[in-house]
Image (cartoon, grey):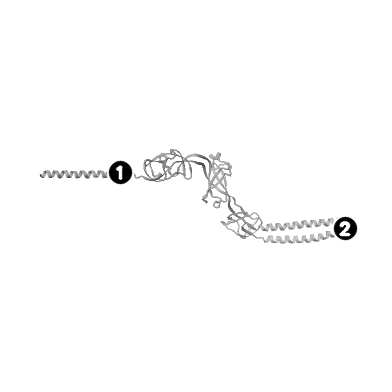
């Protein structure tokens, strides 16, 4: 009886140990399953077949077509310069004043000369009248009257010359007040109060952005494709606005220093554009009616080359691609995918081939 009881206890103990071992194995199996790679959160998009522009871009510089250096037109001392560098001026605004005292004195002298000649002419007119009366009475010959008439004509011409000299002095005097020839910004003040300037001496330089010209060096390999009148989009760091212009002309020679062709395009009335700034020009060379476009962030670099990740059965499948044109945040795929394929967009840089993924939001390439 005692032996039977011991045997039963041993059987119960063995059964208990075996059951615990099976539970541990089941728990370990579930733990191993939970330790698998977690899916990566991504967004997806579709490969879109669309028409695109074939463009070429280059960086150049902006030239101001209106940047006059204001020079003295008369010799005089500078009384005052009314503007400073960096100050914006309007066309017709007084920017400098020169001493006009010398011209006032010359005007007084010329006016006195006019008065003297007028007096002589008045007297000569009376002499001619009397002489003509004597001729009519046959007291003197006609030759005497002709001499008096000639003297009268001389005085008339002298009077005309004296009045013209007054006009000339007034014109020169008006040049002592110097006005801005155009809207713009004072770039440089060359003279200051008290300095004496001669005719032609520079006083100020004004920069205007009313008319600008972009010089853009494009590579010589596309020189045969460029023509005046082609559309070109221009942008500059000083402005957020993209300006559409056309190629005005092409310089006839290839630049030896960088083997490029200088393309010229004009910009008018853009307040934020500045002469001397850099400019990026994009020329539309042509159009392509069909191109497979995807967002740029969908294309990532791997040891195999440029790849995108196709979405199939909850996994990312690597596809090696070749790229072409870049345009407005999109890149052309010339080989490796088909239209309407679903690919990973955001999160592609964190993936490897066959990696599990979890889609959060769907997008379509625009």
Residue at left offset 20%, top offset 44%: 17
Q: Which residue matches tag 1?
A: 33
Give how far across and how far down residue 246 sits, in percent.
57, 45
Residue at left offset 86%, top offset 55%: 142
Q: Residue 306's image quarter?
A: top left
Q: Nearer the viewer, residue 84 or 314?
A: 314
Residue density around tag 1, few if under 14, some if 14–19, many if 20 or more, within 10 Å = few
The correct choice, above or below, for 167 with respect to 317 in the image is: below
Q: CA distance from mark 2 to mark 1?
A: 144 Å
Say whether marks 2 and 1 touch (CB < 8 Å). Answer: no
Q: Residue pushed farthest right?
A: 138
Q: Which residue matches tag 2?
A: 136
The correct choice, above or below, for 255 with respect to 203 in the image is: above
Is residue 279 shown to the viewer in this render?
no
Q: Nearer the viewer, residue 161 or 343?
A: 343
Q: Residue 90's image quarter?
A: bottom right
Say how many tags the image has: 2
């Amino acid at each position: 009886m005692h032996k039977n009881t011991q045997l039963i206890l041993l059987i119960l103990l063995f059964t208990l140990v075996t059951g615990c071992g099976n539970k541990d194995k089941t728990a370990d199996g579930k733990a191993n399953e939970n330790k698998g790679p977690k899916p990566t959160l991504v967004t997806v998009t579709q490969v879109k077949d669309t028409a695109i522009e074939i463009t070429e871009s280059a960086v150049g510089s902006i030239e101001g077509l209106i940047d006059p250096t204001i020079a003295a037109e008369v010799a005089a001392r500078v009384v005052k310069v009314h503007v400073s560098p960096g100050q914006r001026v309007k066309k017709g605004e007084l920017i400098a004043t020169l001493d006009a005292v010398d011209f006032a004195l010359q005007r007084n002298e010329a006016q006195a000369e006019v008065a003297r000649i007028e007096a002589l002419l008045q007297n000569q007119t009376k002499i001619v009248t009397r002489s003509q009366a004597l001729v009519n009475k046959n007291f003197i010959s006609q030759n005497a009257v002709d001499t008096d008439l000639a003297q009268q004509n001389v005085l008339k011409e002298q009077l005309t010359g004296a009045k013209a000299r007054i006009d000339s002095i007034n014109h020169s005097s008006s040049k002592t007040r110097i006005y801005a020839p155009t809207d713009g910004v004072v770039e440089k003040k060359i003279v200051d109060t008290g300095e004496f300037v001669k005719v032609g001496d520079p006083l100020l330089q004004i920069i205007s952005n009313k008319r600008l010209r972009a010089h853009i060096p494009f590579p010589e390999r596309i020189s045969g494709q460029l023509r005046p009148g082609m559309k070109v989009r221009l942008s500059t760091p000083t402005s957020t606005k993209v300006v559409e212009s056309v190629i005005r002309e092409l310089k006839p020679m290839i630049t030896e220093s960088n083997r490029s062709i200088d393309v010229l395009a004009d910009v008018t009335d853009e307040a934020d554009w500045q002469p001397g700034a850099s400019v990026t020009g994009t020329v539309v060379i042509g159009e392509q009616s069909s191109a497979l476009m995807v967002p740029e962030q969908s294309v990532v670099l791997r040891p195999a080359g440029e790849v995108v990740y196709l979405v199939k059965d909850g996994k990312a499948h690597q596809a090696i691609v070749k790229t072409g044109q870049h345009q407005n945040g999109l890149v052309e795929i010339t080989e490796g995918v088909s239209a309407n394929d679903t690919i990973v967009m955001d999160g592609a840089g964190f993936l490897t081939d066959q990696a599990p993924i979890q889609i959060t939001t769907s997008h379509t390439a625009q």
